[in-house]
Image (cartoon, rainbow, N blue to C red):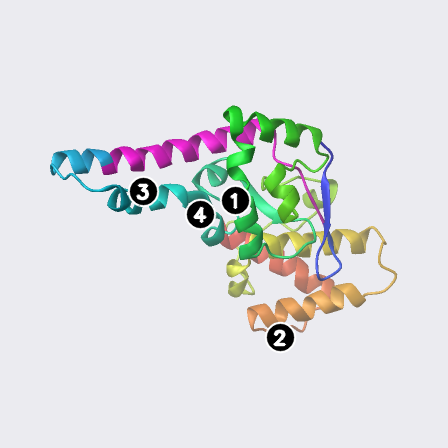
Amino acid sequence: MEAIRIQTAQNVFIEYQPASVGDRIVATVIDGVIAWCYIFLVNHTLERLNLDLGYTARLLLYTPYFFYHLVSEIFLDGQSAGKRAMNIKVVKLDGSQPALGSYLLRWLLRPIDIFFFGAVAMITIASSQKGQRLGDIAAGTSVVSTRPRQTLRDTMMPQAADDYSPLYPQAGRLSDRDVAIIKEALQAYHRGEEQDSYLIQSLTGKVEELLGVRTQQTYVEFLRTVLKDHAHLSR
């Protein structure tokens, strides 16, 4: 599968590598083990307490099992425990943040995708250029790898020494998505894809606002320093 190129609201293109079928299978297995462990724990507890609950009461106790994937993706930014372990996550193909409706569509179509031991999902993912199962196609999402893709420009990014003192300590709270946007903007700038500094200037203003700072550095120097600070603080 080819890399997925997504244009963000800041007109910056970010390339993601679609999660492999193997990674998605392993993530599903991990999530399945967690879910079934919960069911086992509930049943074992009921047996130990010698409780004979009715159908409705048992169904309520099993609710976390049925909603595990939906709740996980909503509150873990497109990831479940299995996805996090395999460094993959759900993203919107239009560059926006997945909304509740997107996660809900994926969850509602999940029973179809996992039909016959996941054969439907595997066939759909393998035949899709963007690695989408039916739920992804309906929701306009895909599952991508979050492992960093090192490029020539990445190796040219400033590296901080062990005794480095961050100029902007607030950079530590930037998300992976924020960092990816800054990197892609700098790469595009250095490739000469932008004829003026409007994009870098606009992004600098957004990063300043996000961090609550005002810089005296040039736009490029500021963004490179923020990346350097974030890398140091994230060690």
On the image, the x and y values in percent for residue 226 come to 61, 60
Q: Mark 4 or mark 2: name the one nearer the start of the chain.
A: 4
Tell whether label 2 touches label 4 (CB within 8 Å). Answer: no
- Quick check: 191 left or right of 141? right
Residue occupying image coordinates x 53% and y 52%: 232
- Quick check: 146 left or right of 58? right
- Binning the other alpha carbons within 10 Å of mark 2 as few (below 14), some (14 to 19) or many (20 upward) gives few
Three-letter code, disc 1: Leu
Q: Mark 1 or mark 3: name the one nearer the start of the chain.
A: 3
For the residues marked 2 and 3, what is the alpha-carbon distance in whole angstroms? 51 Å
For the residues marked 1 and 3, what is the alpha-carbon distance in whole angstroms? 17 Å
Which residue is nearer to you in this view: 211 or 152?
211
Q: Nearer the viewer, mark 2 or mark 3?
A: 3
Q: Is residue 165 visible?
A: no
Q: For mark 3, what is the residue?
A: 62
Q: For mark 4, what is the residue?
A: 72
Tell whether label 3 touches label 2 (CB within 8 Å). Answer: no
Q: Mark 1 or mark 2: name the one nearer the start of the chain.
A: 1
On the image, the x and y values in percent for residue 4 come to 71, 42
Is residue 17 rendered magenta in the image?
Answer: yes
For the residues marked 1 and 4, what is the alpha-carbon distance in whole angstroms? 14 Å
Q: Nearer the viewer, mark 1 or mark 2?
A: 1
Label 1 element class: helix
Residue occupying image coordinates x 63% and y 66%: 207
Q: Is residue 111 visible?
A: yes
Three-letter code, disc 2: Arg
Three-letter code, disc 3: Tyr
For the residues marked 1 and 2, what is the alpha-carbon distance in whole angstroms? 46 Å
- Binning the other alpha carbons within 10 Å of mark 3 as few (below 14), some (14 to 19) or many (20 upward) gives some
Q: For mark 2, what is the residue?
A: 214
Label 3 element class: loop
On the image, the x and y values in percent for residue 215 come to 64, 72
